[in-house]
Amino acid sequence: MRQPFDVVVIGSGIAGLSFALKAAGAGRVAVVTKKEDKASATNYAQGGIAAVLSPLDDFESHISDTLVAGAGLCRREAVEVMVREAPRLIGELIELGVGFNRSPEASDGEGAGEAPDGGDPLHLGREGGHSHYRIVHVHDLTGAEVEQALVTAVSAHPNITVYENHIGLDLITEHYLGTTKHTVPGKHTVYGAYVLDSARGEVVAFPARITLLATGGCGQIYRHTTNPDISTGDGLAMSARAGCELANMEFMQFHPTSLYGTGDPAFLISEAVRGFGGILCNAEGEAFMAGEHPLKDLAPRDIVARAIDRQLKATGAPYVFLDLTHRSSSEIEERFPHIVTTCRELGLDPSRDRLPVVPAAHYMCGGIPTNLWGETVLPRLFAIGEVACTGVHGANRLASNSLLEGLVFAERAAIRVQEVLGAQGLDVPEPPPWDVAGTRLSREHILVSHDRMEIRNLMWDYVGLVRSTSRLLRAERRLSIITQEVEQYYRWTRVTAELLELRNMVQVALLIAQSALSRKESRGLHYVTDFPESVAELDGKDTIMPFDWGTVTL
Ligand SMILES: Cc1cc2nc3c(=O)[nH]c(=O)nc-3n(C[C@H](O)[C@H](O)[C@H](O)COP(=O)(O)OP(=O)(O)OC[C@H]3O[C@@H](n4cnc5c(N)ncnc54)[C@H](O)[C@@H]3O)c2cc1C
C-alpha cells in the first residue's frame, strides 16, 4: 500500500491551505483538491476579513455584533476565540505577502486601522451588521490575493504535496475494513480517504494518521448561487456517511445582492458596496430598507434578503436595484475595480446605472460539529472552514467572518494535530483496493445532469429564503426518492466526478430539508411561514441531524 501520510487534507481553500502550512512541521501532508489548487470559494471572496484594528473599535463590539447576527445560536467561547485571534492572523497574512489596502493619510478615525506590521494604517471597510469599520481588504479581490499567497507558500513547502484533480470520495473507516457494514454516529475511526484521480478515472486510497476536511460549502445545491462549481457539499456528505451528525443545516445564508442574470455562479455585488453608501431601491426609486431596520441597508443579511424577497413578491419584478450613482466614478473604481469591470462587460456603469440585484444561496452556517480545536466526534477526523460548525455563526453569519473563521480554526486544528501526532503512534490499517466488481461505465449522463438540475430547482422553490411546512414536506419526499435512485445508480456504475457530486448534493439537500422541518420556529436565516416567531426555549439549541441510511433501500 501507499505509505500512510501523517495528514491528508481534503480541500485547498483558505482553511485547508492555512492548516497545511501550519501542520507541515509535524510530518508529511497531502492536500487533495478537486480541481486546480486555486478553485475554491476563497478565490471568489470580495469584501474582506473582519478584524478589530481601528482605535475606535474593540473586541467586545465585534463579539456582540457576531452574537446579534447569530440570533441566539452562536457559541460565545468560539466567537471570542475567533475575534481575539483576528488582528494577529491578519499580521501573518501580511507577512505571507497579502497586500491589504492602506490609508497612508489617515492616522485615526473609523476607516483606518493599526497595521500589525507597524506600516501605514490599513484601510477598513464596513459591512452589514458591523457597528464599526473593521474589514481589511485588497480592493474587491481579497480572496484571490489570499488564495494566491497561500498557494505560493504551500508550493514551496517541502513537506506538503498537492494532488490536483483528485476528488475525495469517502472516508476510510471500519466499515471499509470489513468490520462493520453501515454507520453508527460517533463510532468509527477515520484512516484517510478514498479519492478519485479524475485524470486516470481510478479510485485510490490515501491512508493517513489524521484526516482533515476543508471542502467548503454547498451553495451549488440551489438554482441561484454565488458559490463556484466545487461547492457541492462533498465533505458534509462524506462525514455524514461515515457517522457524523450534522448541525444547523437549515441555516443557509442567501446573499441579498447577486447581479441579476449573470448565470452560474451568479456574480456577487459585495456587501461592502452598501457599506460604501449603496442604497437598495425598487423600480419606483423607493429606498425600502429605511422602513425595515434601524441599520437600513446595512441590516443583517437575512433581514435584507427577506425584504428584497417581499419587494419581488409584492411588485412581481424580477429584481430590485442597488444604487451607487451618488458616488463618483473614480471613487467607485478605486474601491471596487473588479465589480466595475464586470458590470461594464455587461453594459452597466455603477456610477450611472442602478444595478439589478437578487438574492442567491451563499454560505452554509451549519456543518460538521467540532470543538474549538477542529476535532469532530469521529476519532482522527478534523473539520475546519465552511464545512465545519464551530458555533461562530449561529443562525446567521456576520459578513466577513468566514475567511476569518477559516484562518483561526486552521491554526488551532494544526496545534492539536501536532500534539496528537507527537503523542501517539497512530497505526493505519491497510485499506482494501477500491472494489469495482459489478460496476459498469455509465452511458446515461442525462440521469445525472437531470437529477442535479431537479435538486437545484427543488431546493430553490421549496427550501429557499421563505419556507412553509407543506413545501418542506414535499421537498423531503422528493429528495428521499432521488436519494434512493441515485444510490441504486451509484452501486452499479463506475464512479465519475459528476456522479460523486450528485450523490453528495442530494444527501446534503435532504439533510437541509429535514433540519428545516425539525426546527418549528423562525430564527436568523430560517424563516417558516407556519412558525413566524422565535421560540425562547430554543435559544442555544442546535439542530442535530444524522444521515439516515433507512431512507436508502438497496
Ligand atoms: C462570491 C463569494 C464572496 C465571498 N466573500 C467573502 C468575504 O468577502 N469575506 C468572507 O469572510 N467570506 C466571503 N465569502 C465566503 C468565503 O469565501 C468562504 O466561506 C470561505 O472561503 C470558505 O473557505 P474554505 O477553505 O472552507 O472552503 P473553499 O474556499 O470553498 O475551499 C474548498 C476546497 O475544497 C475543495 N473540495 C471540495 N470538495 C472536494 C472533494 N470532494 N475532494 C477534494 N477537494 C474538494 C475545493 O476544490 C476547494 O479547494 C464569499 C463567498 C463567495 C462565494
Image (spheres, rainbow, N blue to C red):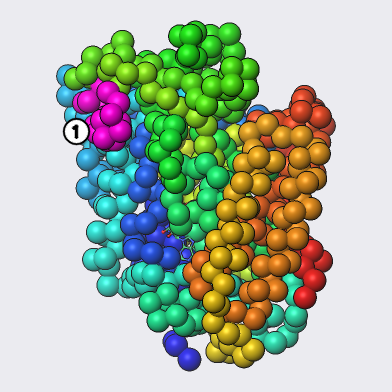
Q: Is residue 122 left or right of residue 551?
A: left
SS at circle 1: loop
Q: Compare residues 461 and 93 and report the one nearer the observer.
A: 461
Callout 1: CB less than 8 Å from ligand 1: no
Q: Look at 53% across and 50% down and name the residue there.
A: 220
Q: Is residue 227 left or right of residue 393?
A: left
Which residue appears at 22% of the width and 48% of the height? Answer: 97
- Check the image and report above or below for 500 versus 314: below
Residue closest to the eye, 224 or 68 = 224
**Mark 1 nearby-residue class (10 Å; few <14, some 14–19, many ≥20):** few
Q: Residue at x 59, y 25 (%)?
A: 309
Question: Relative to 480, is 68 above or below?
Answer: above
The reply to whether residue 142 is visible in this rendering is yes
Q: Position of residue 370 (x, y in %)?
A: 61, 54
Can the viewer see residue 113 in this picture? no
Q: Quadrant of the C terminus?
A: bottom right
Residue 124 coordinates in the image, percent (x, y): 32, 26
Residue that label 1 marks: 119
Quadrant of the rendered image containing residue 516: top right
Residue 223 x, y percent position in the rendering: 55, 45
* Amino acid on which disc 1 is placed: Gly
At 55% from the left and 77% from the top, the residue drawn is 442
Q: Main secondary structure of the magenta part?
A: helix
Nearest the camera: 152 or 480?
A: 480
Using the image as rendered, state which of residue 479 and residue 243 is in the foreground.
479
Residue 127 in magenta?
Answer: no
Q: Which residues are magenta?
A: 332-349
Asked if residue 422 is positioned above or below residue 104 in the image, the reply reads below
Image location (x, y in percent) of residue 193: 53, 75
